[in-house]
Image (cartoon, rainbow, N blue to C red):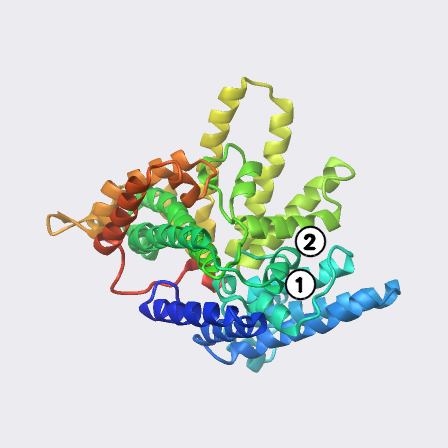
Amino acid sequence: MLFNTSIFFVFLLITFVFYWFSAKYNNKISKFILLTASYIFYGWWDWRFLILIVISSLTDYVIGKYLFRSPKKSTRKLLLAASLLVNIGILFFFKYFNFFIDSFQAVSGIDINKSWSTLTIILPVGISFYTFQTLSYTIDIYRNRITPTRSLLTFFTFVAFFPQLVAGPIERAGRLIPQFEKRASFTYKQATSGLKLMLWGFFKKMVIADQLAKIVNAVYAQPDQFGSWGIIFATLLFGYQIYCDFSGYSDIAIGTARLFGIELMTNFKTPYLATSFREFWHRWHISLSTWFRDYVYIPLGGNRGSSLFWMRNIFITFVVSGLWHGANITFLIWGALHGLFLIIEHFISKGIKINRKLKSRLGWIITFLLVNLSWIFFRAESWQHIKKLAIGITINHQSGNFASLLIKEGHFSNAGRMLLLIFPVFILIEFLMKEKSFDEFLSGFSRPLQWGIFYLIIVVILFFGVLNAAPQFIYFQF
């Protein structure tokens, strides 16, 4: 089920009413309603995927209990290994099996059994997200950071909570489970704050991201038709498409969770205002970057030891992060590039001493350009596609047919009007927001002005939003 569909609003309204009606009388019943709703939400794509999420949930619930009870180090290691084997095993099979079989055949020249190499595997929606979420539970118990929950219902709800199930934020058990265990209490302030955030998220997704997608998809489908400047401009626009698409999803997820009295972590903090690559990764997909920091980078050794070991740890972390996004060489290159950016930045910042204000401005320009231009590897569909784009950038210097994407039959297209009228206003708002959330930003205005802004956003969505279709969120494929 997609957020940007009418069926979701019907589903949300029914769940909201039943949840809060039951919460008055019994917390277990309200939690059961939330879990049932979450399984309906997830099963809307394919009910068979529910089997996988139940297996992961049940495995880590049982292992978590035994981990906590067992004092023996060797037993605890075996239990943790079992959790990793089940969860990573499922993830590997559904997401990476064909990629590694194809890669092995290409490198070795050995022709593996054809029934294996042509195996059709459907990628379950959100498997990377909920796998990481449930894994963090057993790892944190192993590290004695949390105690396991006694309630099977609570744990299953923690894994499957529908607002953040398929694309995050990736929550930690120590933060989310206590919220499910306490008695639900409705507050008008929290609910209205959630609705404001949802509205901003729908604006970013339906108006900015989905309109930019029309331009980006057209250029990337036929890069030879649009020339170098067309490809570069489309790549910069993709940077904002993916940002508005994903942060829009996060805003809707966080806002929806607030309707049920649950606070999820902030996932984005205006990342394109970052003045360094290090700062960018403190602002972009925060729940994933902190997950890799805590469960990959630090266990590898972090910044302990020599510079060589630190460089290795950073590079491995970002390559694995790239692989997390998808079974494709394009994501590996993208991850490796960000690892290299951080390493180079670290040594340059240590070796060059310049005025702080100048450093900040230069840092923003370099970070913004390299982060956005590196999206070309993220957006490319294959190595062959990357070569096609590279040829288009380096050889074909004509502007091509780019104007035709903005103007049709003498009139600006919806995407063109949005790009000229709405997009600059959005950039300005992002600049003014700094690291604040949308509802925090609005709190500085008078109540009548706030309501005026809400109605204006609704009008903009109705006039400029992509309403006749429900484009999937980009991160659903991960």
Query: What residue would you read off at disc 2?
Result: 295
Number of marks in the image? Answer: 2
Can you give x and y, in whole percent of width and height, for residue 66 in the image? 79, 70
Residue at far top of view: 355
Q: Quadrant of the N terminus?
A: bottom left
Residue drawn at 35 percent across, 55 percent down: 202
Taking the image as shown, residue 165 lies to the left or right of residue 251, namely: right
Which mark, by number, is residue 43? none
* Mark 1–mark 2 distance (CA, rounded to whole Å): 10 Å
Taking the image as shown, residue 126 lies to the left or right of residue 392, namely: right
Vertical placement of residue 288 versus 128, above or below: above
Query: What residue would you read off at disc 1?
Result: 135
Q: Amino acid at mark 2?
A: Tyr
Q: Label 2's element?
A: helix
Q: Is residue 1 visible?
A: no
Residue drawn at 49 percent across, 42 percent down: 269
Q: Label 1's element?
A: helix
Q: Residues within 10 Å of mark 1 (few under 14, many from 20)?
A: many
Q: Kindly indicate whether the residue at mark 2 contacts the one at mark 1 (C-beta within 8 angstroms).
A: yes
Residue at far right of view: 72
Residue at far left of view: 410
Can you give x and y, in whole percent of width and height, for residue 12 in the image? 40, 67
Q: Amino acid at mark 1?
A: Leu
Taking the image as shown, residue 140 lies to the left or right of residue 160, namely: right
Taking the image as shown, residue 268 lies to the left or right of residue 401, namely: right
Kindly indicate the quadrant of the structure image that contains residue 136: bottom right
Q: Is residue 395 visible?
A: yes
Can you give x and y, in whole percent of width and height, for residue 447 in the image? 32, 41
